[in-house]
Amino acid sequence: MPRAHVDPDRLRRELESLLGARRVSMRDGDLDTYARDMWPRLLLARRDGQLPEHRPHAVVWPETQRELVALVKLARSLAIPVIPYGGGSGVCGGVVPLRGGITIDLKRMQAIRSVSRDEMVVDVEAGLSGERFERELRRRGYTFGNFPSSIYCSTVGGWLATRAAGQLSTKYGKVEDRVAGLTVITGRGELIETDGPSRAVRGPNWTQLLVGSEGTLGIIAAARLRLSTAPQLEIFRGFEFDDVAAGTEAIRRVLQRGLRPAVVRLYDELDTFINSLGKKAATGDHAGAPITTGYGAPHDLSAAPVPMPGEGALPVLPRPEPPADDGVVSRLLAIARGRRRGLHKEAVGLALDHAKLVNRIAGTVARRGCRMVIGLEGARIRTEVEAALTFAELAHAGGRDTGEEAGWAWLAHRYAVSYRMSPTFRDGAFVDTMEVASTWERLMDLYHSVRDAISQHAVVMAHFSHAYAEGCSIYFTFAAHADDLAGSRRLYDTIWRDGLEAVTRVGGTISHHHGVGLLKGPYMAGEHREGMAVLHGLKQSLDPDNLMNPGKLGMAAAPTGVPRKEAS
Amino acid sequence: MPRAHVDPDRLRRELESLLGARRVSMRDGDLDTYARDMWPRLLLARRDGQLPEHRPHAVVWPETQRELVALVKLARSLAIPVIPYGGGSGVCGGVVPLRGGITIDLKRMQAIRSVSRDEMVVDVEAGLSGERFERELRRRGYTFGNFPSSIYCSTVGGWLATRAAGQLSTKYGKVEDRVAGLTVITGRGELIETDGPSRAVRGPNWTQLLVGSEGTLGIIAAARLRLSTAPQLEIFRGFEFDDVAAGTEAIRRVLQRGLRPAVVRLYDELDTFINSLGKKAATGDHAGAPITTGYGAPHDLSAAPVPMPGEGALPVLPRPEPPADDGVVSRLLAIARGRRRGLHKEAVGLALDHAKLVNRIAGTVARRGCRMVIGLEGARIRTEVEAALTFAELAHAGGRDTGEEAGWAWLAHRYAVSYRMSPTFRDGAFVDTMEVASTWERLMDLYHSVRDAISQHAVVMAHFSHAYAEGCSIYFTFAAHADDLAGSRRLYDTIWRDGLEAVTRVGGTISHHHGVGLLKGPYMAGEHREGMAVLHGLKQSLDPDNLMNPGKLGMAAAPTGVPRKEAS
């Protein structure tokens, strides 16, 4: 795909006349930084000291919707692309400027414009950091309920552009379930407000059309999002099941009974085994943990109604430190989860070069069973009742209660994985994750097919999370190793090809919440088939010049906008 | 708008070669029947013996998706419109064939293809009657949870095409909240399956784009819908509040606390007053009613888990007969609710000709307060807990418990209103309903503004229902009278114009669940503004010849497809 042509001096002049010199950059350092996100395939090249293949022509930091409109109109007049950019934490290459253009960093648009107590919605600008967003809401007695592991380095707009899911999505839903309306600047430079202030019919729904469009139809500038009351009570617990089939069946029963734990995570045999290595016995040092008793007999229903937001929501309780994990084997294998830094390079290489062997451990350790972490939160009485019913259901389905600590330990570490990837790459290996989903009926087929496909090439483990009444997602983590960049890339591409082909074969979906970007573009047509015509029609209508983040979601990067079957 | 031109003999020949002679009709009786739905403005003309202004060229009854594709392709080749037709129970003129064409009745496509116990979804064809759909699901231990008052005469496809809501939407959601995927034949004759079998990211969401499109983008042929477990327990109760402001505030508190009653309905002062006339004192004849006690102290949480669908869901319990309503004034005024037939024509005219006077009753009877009906249903223990918390919240907000009978009486009559319109029209008056919505903040403003606007011309009462955490809908019922057809139409149009202008002025939405059709088309642009460009773009993409139900949702009926500001 040809890089868009533009006179750099003219571009700088035009951009600076819109934003001033301080909010425009064409410096090499900035262009390199904004050339990529956290897609591991790009990190491989960076580890090797290679410069980015595709860089934007310029990076800008607008502060108002008016400036966004002006930027899109300028880009159209110059016929160069526009790439919206949030936290840069994506893992699919969704922000790579395939034809150059103007990368628009939205992080200076981060106001919480209003929190409506009457309507329980928040009007927020797209560039706000996820962690700060949640912190500000908690201060007011609310939660948005979206807790991706990237929460410290992702933005609200990024969540919306990719249909993100947080760890507590089983209770709070994915982001698309919480959107009342969006403010979007289309590729035509038109500002559109979707859905307005109120629940409405009024024909097709623009909101869901733009959520998940990954910058290909327009720029999400602001959103109206639905809030929940901050929880009064959190209850965490561990369970253990004989195998993944028994564990997933238990989750299905809980969900289909209408129970909504905030989070339920079932780890497969290998993951459970690795986690169990080097674990200390319970040492009684958790006296500070919140103790919740009597789930079987909720009490005090005649008490005054629970406080409304702002009338006395409880502070967050202190959590116990997680048990230390100091086993030697654990340190070796934990590379696959990005947990440890400073591992000895050769040792890692040894493990990863014998991926099939390591994977086979799963077969021999199956008797150890599968670990489950489950958490519930919400208003006090209802949460206690829901926990009692949920735990009874899990026990009925063959689960063995392993106590509260197992649950709290997960909570303490829940964001860690997103910040442990770089050390792995320095060690000469790479690690990535593949989050797919299917209906319950196909779930075991999906698990075994994808696991078998990946384990030919890499150490692979998985957990089941983000459960729904009709199905569940599976989150595979894999680590592999090759001697040079070319070899690593080849291996990386092979793993993804074999994995996603397995997904398509059994009727799963290629992505649950990481988005599509460049990585999964080639598989869009296989999943959508005739439906791709709708996407091309929308693209034509909202972005006729194909300037909005071209080449993503399986659409053409070419300036002519001709549909193609496969992304590069 | 010019009627499409087609040679009738050729049309008949082509249609019969596709479907056979028995599933094609060009008989006058059929063309007259399919010329309209239940839009009161059309009923006015019919009462006067007028023939329909717009009739289809032909009516057909396809049985397969392949036939649907062939029909759309045939219509394109002949350049005549296609109008999908479900139960014909719409109240906005959505099926009126403005330019003639082929009206496709989908009621022969009514199979329940599968009910997946594993996934809790049902695959159902669009033409299935709503009542039969729900009955079949109950037999299997499930519910779809959509109970519009039209349930006996509307179809699943019609619900989806209009974003319908049922009476229990507060628990089960509107239909758009329950759709996992659609099978749609676009205006290009392409068959598209949206969303597939599993929860997925994959960019924009086609499903929500087609739900509510009212036949203007394609034909909904089948759907995959999410199921709930049939309730084990139903709890109904009546409450009374000082006024609508206190009552709506109570509803807001319940919803924002995360409680989800199946239904909450708050009747305004006039409605409450009329309902109270002629009401018998409780007579103790409700011994057969389900008695539910001890909400304040849920018990037996340690019991075995509740049965799964099919493992022993409870049969539906018998309901008490509602109290008779035999007051004289009630009979006079109940015309506004379509309750009584055979009213003396002059008496009705007298009341309706003094609409302002009757409306003023509301001011003088305000001390009587506002009636609320509330119902909860679901799994036994959780429903008991939720009822206890909900009733405590209502009491805390100033509600006075009026007992169970008030709730059960509503349930017994809940579908009645849809089948009592014709007698009203025979009496020389007309009655219609206007369902609007807004956020909580604007709700009282919306109520008073619309009520004031309509009450210049008609007797008007209202109830609040379909509540959400962020807002609520208001359902106005109005009745009026004029001496002749021209006068009635003028009055009818004036009421709607003044009412919807008031809605737009205060920032409400023009429709909550009846759809747009012809009636509200002129107000689409006022609400969507720049967003209409998206709809026009979609239309251009999926139906480039503007043959799919032309002239609806505020889009042009003209064959050229040029956007216009107002529908006829």
Image (cartoon, coloured by chain):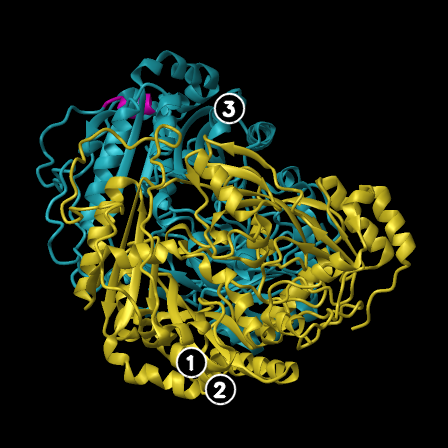
Chain colours: A cyan, B yellow
Q: What residue is shown with label 1?
A: B451
User: In front: B268, or A54?
Assistant: B268
Magenta stretch prevailing secondary structure: helix
Which image quarter holds the C terminus of chain B? bottom right
Q: Residue A406 at x, y = what percent? A: 22, 32
Figure quadrant of residue B382: top left
- Report the amino acid beneath label 1: Arg
Q: What residue is shown with label 2?
A: B353
Q: What stretch is highlighted in magenta?
A: A272-278
Q: Is mark 2 on a helix, strand or loop?
A: helix
* Callouts 2 and 1 close, C-beta under 8 Å: no
Nearer the observer, disc 2 or disc 3? 2
- Report the amino acid beneath label 3: Asp
Q: What residue is shown with label 3?
A: A445
Chain under disc 3: A
Q: What element carries label 3?
A: helix
Q: Residue at x 66, y 57 (%)?
A: B215
Please tell me if label 2 and label 1 are on a single chain: yes
Separation of residues labelled 2 and 3 (CA atoms): 69 Å
Find out whether residue B1 is within the magenta segment.
no
Q: Residue B103 at x, y = what percent? A: 73, 55
Which image quarter holds the N terminus of chain B? bottom right
Q: Residue A275 at x, y = what percent? A: 29, 26
Please tell me if label 2 and label 3 are on a single chain: no
Does residue A515 appear in the picture of this structure? no
Determine whether A442 is above or below B279 in the image. Answer: above
Separation of residues labelled 1 and 3 (CA atoms): 58 Å
Determine whether B505 is above or below A452 in the image. Answer: below
User: In front: B394, or A528?
Assistant: B394
